[in-house]
Image: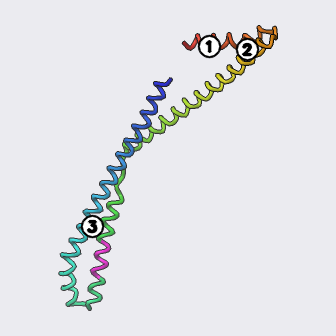
């Protein structure tokens, strides 16, 4: 039982570790794409804003030219941030989630079995202590007192 419980705990830990690795991989991709987006936006702003501003100033006022370039720069930045936020973990995460959920269900079943076993042992000990008390109190209905002892002895021999 302990080996089985240990295996289930290891399975749970491995699935959590795999999920964490997938999440870190996704986050690192997002950071890389956001960084590339920022660099591209900055390069675009530096190189094209000057030339676009000079071109627009000939047709519009300086304020209108600056506002037009600002709007274009914002649209480009938003585009890259949207691309960075659309990164998905993938189907492998679903399989790992299923493994983790299975391990949790199995562990909860084992915990319930351990609780039941502890309750049975508690009841057996109380029967035994009651039987021993009656023997020491010189109650000669020892046949009733010895029944729990015999039951516990037989159960322990069956388990061993």
Q: Which residue is mark 1?
A: 155
Q: CA distance from mark 2 to mark 3?
A: 81 Å
User: Is 91 or 12 nearer to us in this picture?
Assistant: 12
Q: Main secondary structure of the magenta part?
A: helix
At 44% from the left edge and 36% from the top edge, which residue is drawn? 12
Q: Secondary structure at mark 2?
A: helix
Q: Position of residue 126 (x, y in %)?
A: 71, 21
For this view, does 146 lie left or right of residue 33?
right
In front of the other: label 2 or label 3?
2
For this view, does 118 lie left or right of residue 5?
right
Tell me the magenta residue range.
68-75
Q: Quadrant of the C terminus?
A: top right
Q: Position of residue 51 (x, y in %)?
A: 17, 81
Q: Which residue is mark 2?
A: 132
At 42% from the left edge and 34% from the top edge, which residue is drawn? 11
Q: Which residue is mark 3?
A: 38
At 65% from the left edge and 26% from the top edge, which residue is drawn? 119
Characterize the local packing of mark 1: few (<14), some (14-19) or many (20 or more) Cα atoms within 10 angstroms.
few
Image: 146 above or below 64: above
Q: Secondary structure at mark 3?
A: helix
At 23% from the left edge and 75% from the top edge, which residue is drawn? 45
Image: 43 above or below 98: below
In front of the other: label 2 or label 1?
2
Marker disc for residue 10: none
| Mark closest to the chain's N terminus, 2 or 1 | 2
């Amino acid at each position: 039982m302990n080996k089985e419980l240990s295996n289930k705990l290891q399975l749970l830990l491995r699935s959590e570790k795999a999920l964490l690795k997938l999440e870190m991989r996704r986050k690192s991709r997002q950071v890389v794409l956001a960084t590339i987006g920022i660099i591209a936006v900055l390069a675009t702003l530096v190189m094209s804003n000057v030339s676009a501003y000079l071109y627009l100033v000939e047709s519009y006022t300086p304020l209108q030219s600056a506002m037009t370039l600002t709007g274009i720069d914002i649209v480009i930045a938003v585009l890259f941030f949207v691309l960075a936020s659309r990164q998905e973990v993938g189907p492998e995460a679903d399989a790992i989630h299923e493994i983790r959920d299975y391990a949790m269900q199995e562990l909860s079943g084992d915990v319930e079995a351990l609780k039941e076993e502890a309750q049975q042992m508690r009841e057996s000990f109380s029967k035994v202590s009651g039987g021993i008390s009656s023997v020491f109190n010189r109650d000669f209905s020892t046949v009733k007192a010895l029944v729990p002892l015999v039951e516990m002895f037989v159960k322990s021999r069956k388990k061993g």
